[in-house]
Image (tube, helix red, strand yellow):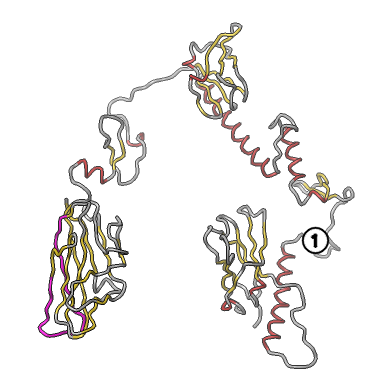
Amino acid sequence: MTVNDKKPVSGPHIADGVNRQWPFDYRLVDQGHMSIVVQDADGLNSQTFTGNISVSSEFLRTDQGGYAVYPVTGLPVESGKRVFAVRNVPYSQPQRIGNQGTFYPLTHEDTFDLISMQVQQAKELIDRSVKAEVGGDGLTISPGPLGSVPVYDAFGNLSTSIQAGSIATSEFWGRQAREWAVSTELVDDGVNAPNYSSRQWALYAETKSAEAQDVINNGLNLLLHNSIVIYFLTGELSVPLGASPGSKNNVSVVQGGVIQSPSTYELQTIGGVPTIIFSEPAAADGWIVFGGAIEVNTPSDKSVTFAKMQDIASLRLMGRATAGSGNPEELTVAQVRTMLGLGPAPGAPMFQAYPSANQTLTNSTMTKVQCNTENFDPQGCFDNVTNFRFTPNVAGIYRVKGTVAGTGTSVTQVIAAIYKNGSLFHSVPVNPSAAQSSALQSTAELLVAMNGTTDYLELFAQISATSGWSVVGATPLRSFFEAYRVGP
C-alpha cells in the first residue's frame, strides 16, 4: 500500500490530566515507531518519550491511523501540556534482501513503506530548519568573533555576537535582562538584582509597567480632586507631609495597594513639619493621600433607576430572609415560597427507577422489586443500591406509582404493592380470566403523606404461575417505581 503524503506529526493535543489516548492520522508499521512529545503550555520546553507507549494492532498498516496510549502506566500527562504523536522510524536499512530465496510481498511492502516514512521524517525536520534561498551556495552568516553566534535586531542588522556555548541556555539572556533592569532602575544594582531568567525578567518588567500605570492613573485622579499625594518606599518609618491634614483621620495610607488601618500610624509634628510615623517600617511601597473635598449628594425621590442598582442573578428576588432589619438580600425561589408559607415547590423531591434486568421471584410470595437503575433522582432520595427505597427529605403529600410486569408459565395473578415503612400500604391484584403465557402488568398508584425524615416507600410484587416467576426489567416501559411531591 502506498504511504500517503501526510506529515508524520499529529497534534498538538491539549492534555486534561485524565486522557491517555492521543490520535494520529498517518500510516504506522510498528508500535515501536511511535514516540510522544510533551511540551509546556507555551511550547518552549519539550520532552520526547519512546517507551511506555502502546498502539493497538488494529491501527497498524492503515492510512486512517488511530490513537496511541501514553502513558500505559503511571500518572497521565499534566493538564495544560501540549502533546504530539510523532512517527519515529529509525534511520537504518529497513530490510536486507539477498539475491536468493523467497520473500513475502508484505516484506517488500513494509520495506518500501519504511523508506518513504524515513523520507517524510527527514522532510518534516528540514521544514523546521533555517534554509538558504534557491540558487545559493548555503546559508550566509556574517562573521563574528571565534566561537560566537551573531544576533540580529528586528530590522535584520547585526547587533551583537554571543558565545556559542551560551545560545542553548537562558543564562546569557538572563544576564542581558539584569543589566537592562539595573540601567532602567527597575532594581537598585547588579548585586541586588534577582537571578531571574530572561522570561522571568520579561514578566517582571510587564508587572512593573502595569503598577506604574496604576500609580499614574491614581495620581491623576487625585489631582483632579485637589488632593495631595505623597509616595513612600518599602522600609521607610516616617513620611513628611509638607502640609497639615488636620488629624490622622483625614489621611489615607496605602501600602502595596491595601488601605492601612489608622491604628498602624500616627500624625506628629517633627521640626515644624507634619509627619506620618508608622508603627513598623513600611512593608511595601505606597502612598499617603489627604486634602481635597468630598461632595455628598442625596438622590431626589423616585430618581434611582434600575440601571443604578446592583445586578442580581437570574430567578432571584430582592428582599430579606435574615431576621431583623438590614440590607436587602437576593432571595431564591425556595426562600420566597417559605416566606409566603407555600413550602417547597411541587415536584421536589422526585425520582423514577426501574430494574436493570429480570428479577426472579418465588411463586405467590410478596418480594421487594430491586429498582437499581435511576432515570432521575435530583435530590438523591432514592436508594438504588442497597434497600431500593424512597426516603424524601421534604414533608408533604406525594403521588406514588409502581408498575410491575410479571411473567411466567400459566400466570394466574400479578400483584403490585406499595409498602410504607416496611408494611403493606396499598396493593392492586390483576387476575386474568384465563392463565397467561405472556407478561401481565399491574399498577399501584395513590397519594401518600410523608414526614420528610423517617418515612420511606418501597415497591413489592407477587406473581402466581406454574413456573418461571419473574419481574420484567431492563426498561422503564414494563416495570418501574416513581414518586414526586404534589403539595404540603
Q: Position of residue 184 (x, y in %)?
A: 71, 32
Q: Residues within 10 Å of mark 1 (few under 14, many from 20)?
A: few
Residue 118 magenta: no
Which residue corresponds to the image point at 19% horizontal and 51% vertical from the top-left?
A: 395
Q: Quadrant of residue 231?
A: top right
Which residue corresponds to the image point at 15% horizontal and 58% vertical from the top-left?
A: 448
- The reply, left or right, for residue 22 in relation to residue 344 is right
* Residue underneath mark 1: 132
Q: Residue furthest bottom?
A: 101
Q: Quadrant of residue 312?
A: top left
Q: In front here: 450 or 204?
A: 450
Does residue 344 sit above or below 298 in this rendering? below
Q: Quadrant of the N terminus?
A: bottom right
Which residue corresponds to the image point at 59% horizontal and 35% vertical from the top-left?
A: 210
Q: How many marks?
A: 1
Q: Position of residue 456 (x, y in %)?
A: 21, 58
Which residue corresponds to the image point at 20% horizontal and 55% vertical from the top-left?
A: 455
- Magenta region: 428-449
Residue type, label 1: Ala
Q: Secondary structure at mark 1?
A: loop
Q: Quadrant of residue 134?
A: bottom right
Q: In front here: 9 or 326?
A: 326
Q: Position of residue 313 (x, y in %)?
A: 35, 44
Residue 448 magenta: yes
